[in-house]
Image (cartoon, rainbow, N blue to C red):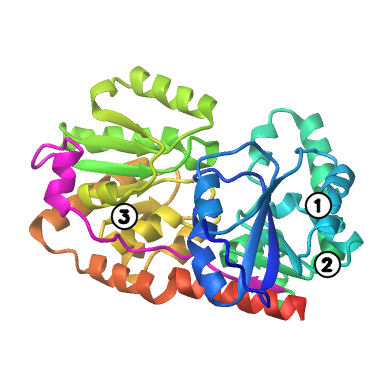
Amino acid sequence: MVTDRQPSAMRVLTFINWLGRGGVETALLRCLPHLRARGVEVDVCCQGARRELDADFERCGCRILRIRKCAVPLETAWRLGRELRAGRWDLLHSRMGATSGGAVLAAARCGLPAVVSVHNGPAATLPAWAARPGLAAVRRAWLGWHRRLIDRHARMIVGHSAANLDAFAPGWRSDPARHRVVVNGVEPPGPGPDREECRRLLGLEPGRLAVLHVGSFKPQKNHAGLLAAFARVRESEPGALLLLAGAGPERGERYARRAVRAMGLDGAVRFEGPLAGLRAHYLAADVLLAPSTLEGFGNALAEAQAAGLPAVASDIPAHRESVAPGAQRFLFPLPDYARAAELVLEQARAARAGRNPWVAEAGEHVRAHFTVERMAGELADIYGEVAG
C-alpha cells in the first residue's frame, strides 16, 4: 500500500456507491497515480460493502470510508457530514450524478466546496418505472429534491461526455464556469501475448468469427437487441460466437441466459463473467458490438479502438463522442438490428482482407483525446479552481 502522503497535497473525498468493476470506478482507479503526481490525494466514501476494486484503491493509497446507503438526502447529508467533520479534506467530489443532493448538502454544512460528476444522460432507472406511473411520479419528485440541492450547493458539475450535460443541464454551455466536460481516459493494451496466442488462450478456433460485448447486464446495455443482431450475423456466419464479458445485476444475467436458450443460441453464446482485464478479449475478438440504448460514455468502444478492435455500436449521442470520425459510419440506428448485423459482417470481411484503415485512425483518435493523463490533469485543474 502507498502510505507516503504528500503533506502539502490537496485532499479530495470522492463519494461513490461502491468500488465494483464498472466504467466509472475503473476510470477513477486509473487516474489515481496521475492525480497524485499533480498533488491531489484521493480518499473514497462508499455506500456499499467491499467490492472487486477495494483492494486496488487501497494499494494506491486511498483511505476507504463507508456509510449506510439511504434514500433520504437529509439522512445521507447527516451520515456523510459526520465523516467530513472528522477528516481533513479540501473538497468533496460526488460521483452519484443526479442523486448527489445529500452529498453536496453535507459538504455545504461542513464548509467544503463540492463537485458533482454526471455519468449518464437521463436518470438510467426511470425507464424501468414507465409501467408504474404513480411510483414514477414519486421518483421524479425525489430526483427533483436532489436536483434542487445540487443546483444550490454544487460549485462545479462535470459531465463525462457532452451528452451527459445536454441531458442533465441543457443550457450548460451558457455557464462554462460551472459546467465542464471531462471524458473518461482509457489505456491501450499493455505488453503480453499477441492476437493468435490470445485466441488460443480463449479457445477460439482459427477462422471462427468472434463478436465481443462488454458491459453489465443492465437494461440500458440492451442484451435483447444484442442477441437479435447476433442471430442475424449467424445467418451468414453459422459458426459465429458471441462473448459476453460483464457481470450483474443477477436478474439481468438470468434474463440474458433465458433469452439465449429461447433463441436456440446455447452453443453460440459464451458468458465470460466479470473480468479483471480485457486485453485478451479485445485482441482475440473480431468485432465489438455495443447496441446500448443509453450510455454516459462509450468506455468499451474507446478501449476497443485503443486495442485495434473494429467496433459496431448504436447511434446514440455518447457513442458519437467516443467513436473516431472515420468509424462513425459503423453506428446503426436503433432498433435496426438487421443493419447492425450487416455492419458486423462488413467489419469482419474488411479485417480479413486487411482493408480497414479506419481502425488505425480510431486508435490515433483515442490516443489523442482519451488518455488517462489528460483526464487526470483536467480533474486536477478543476479541483484547484473549485478549492481556490
> In the rendering, which numbered label is found on residue 311?
3
- 210 sits left or right of 362 in the view: left
Q: Residue 341 at x, y = what percent?
A: 28, 43
**140 over 103 or under it: above or below:** above
> In the rendering, which numbered label is found on residue 304?
none
Per the image, the residue denoted by label 1 is: 83
**186 over 142 or under it: above or below:** below
Find numbered disc 1 in the image and state the secondary structure of the residue it sits on.
Answer: helix
Image quarter for residue 256? top left
Magenta-highlighted residues:
179-208
Q: Are marks 3 and 1 in contact (CB under 8 Å)?
A: no
Find numbered disc 3 in the image and state the secondary structure of the residue it sits on.
Answer: strand
- 33 sits left or right of 15 in the view: left
**Kind of residue sitting beneath label 1:** Glu
Q: Was residue 198 drawn as part of the magenta stretch in this picture?
A: yes
* Distance of label 1 from label 2 (alpha carbons): 12 Å
Between disc 3 and disc 2, whose residue precedes? 2
Q: Is residue 224 visible?
A: yes
**Kind of residue sitting beneath label 2:** Leu
**Kind of residue sitting beneath label 3:** Ala
For the point 59% across and 38% down, which residue is it?
A: 50
Per the image, the residue denoted by label 2 is: 112
Between disc 1 and disc 2, whose residue precedes? 1
Between disc 3 and disc 1, whose residue precedes? 1
The secondary structure that most of the magenta stretch takes on is loop
